[in-house]
Image: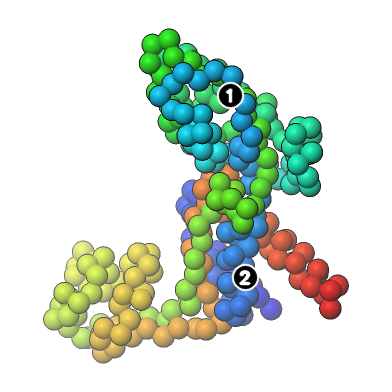
Amino acid sequence: MVSLEVVSKKENKMTFLVKSSSPAYSNALRRIMLTEVPVMAIEELEIRKNNSALYDEVLAHRLGLIPLTTDLKSYELPKSEEDITERKAKCTLLLTLKEKGPKTVYASDLKSKDPKVKPVFPKIQIVKLLKDQQLELSATAILGKGKDHAKFSSCHVWYNYNPKITINKKADASIFKELYPADIFNKKGEVDESLIIKNNLVDAVANVNEDIIKVDYNEKEYIFQLESWGQLSPKEIIVESLKVFDDKLDELKKAL
């Protein structure tokens, strides 16, 4: 049975180990995390005033790429264009912005109708307004998937086979020091396995000199590195991706 074990987590980053897996399963899980986990992003924009240096199209593009915190319990994916145009409460969220220069307009200046959904990074610059320049707009945010547009991507994730690293402490690694990344050596000048893992340098040390460092890979265990863009926590992304995976397998079972 496939199992998951958290190796480390920090803010929006998580490293976890998937055991008893296969390349097909691991890659399917990775692709679902990238393209199938829904997150909020601005989809439609109504610009009432804009005499800033940015064209409306450029402004819309910048706003669309601002990551928004996402509440999957309160919102659902729009099933049709009508769900968006009619601004159904379960499918859409209204954000407004009204500013006058001179000032720098930040993501935090967007006013959300739902306090749970707001810009992940408040200090993202939208535009600089000079004296008497104005920007007034309303934006509609919806849930979407990364396969439809990059702005709906929840994270970046990649994986490697789980390595087994054997370090020969009796060998003189200093002779081959120039062939290895500097980040694998601790303050004493010794090869440190934890630094190899932490700095993701397993492939860099493999096959250089097996008498010093030997790397074997377990083809049934996979180390995943997940970095969330902030809309959802790494845990939420993993849980949601597993739900999506199960739903897809159920659909396949019914089709068969």
212 in relation to 142, above or below = below
Q: Quadrant of the C terminus?
A: bottom right
Percent of width and height locating residue 227: 49, 55
The residue that disc 2 covers is 28
User: Residue at horizontal 61%, vertical 30%?
Assistant: 45
Q: Quadrant of the N terminus?
A: bottom right
Q: Amino acid at mark 2?
A: Ala
Percent of width and height locating residue 111: 59, 24
Percent of width and height locating residue 30: 57, 66
Front position in the image: 171 or 62: 62
Q: On the picture, is 240 further left or further right than 13?
A: right
Callout 1: few (<14), some (14-19), or many (20+) C-alpha neighbours within 10 Å? some
User: Residue at horizontal 63%, vertical 53%?
Assistant: 148
User: Residue at horizontal 56%, vertical 82%?
Assistant: 220
Q: CA distance from mark 1 to mark 2?
A: 40 Å
The residue that disc 1 covers is 47
Evaluate whether residue 195 shows in this view: yes
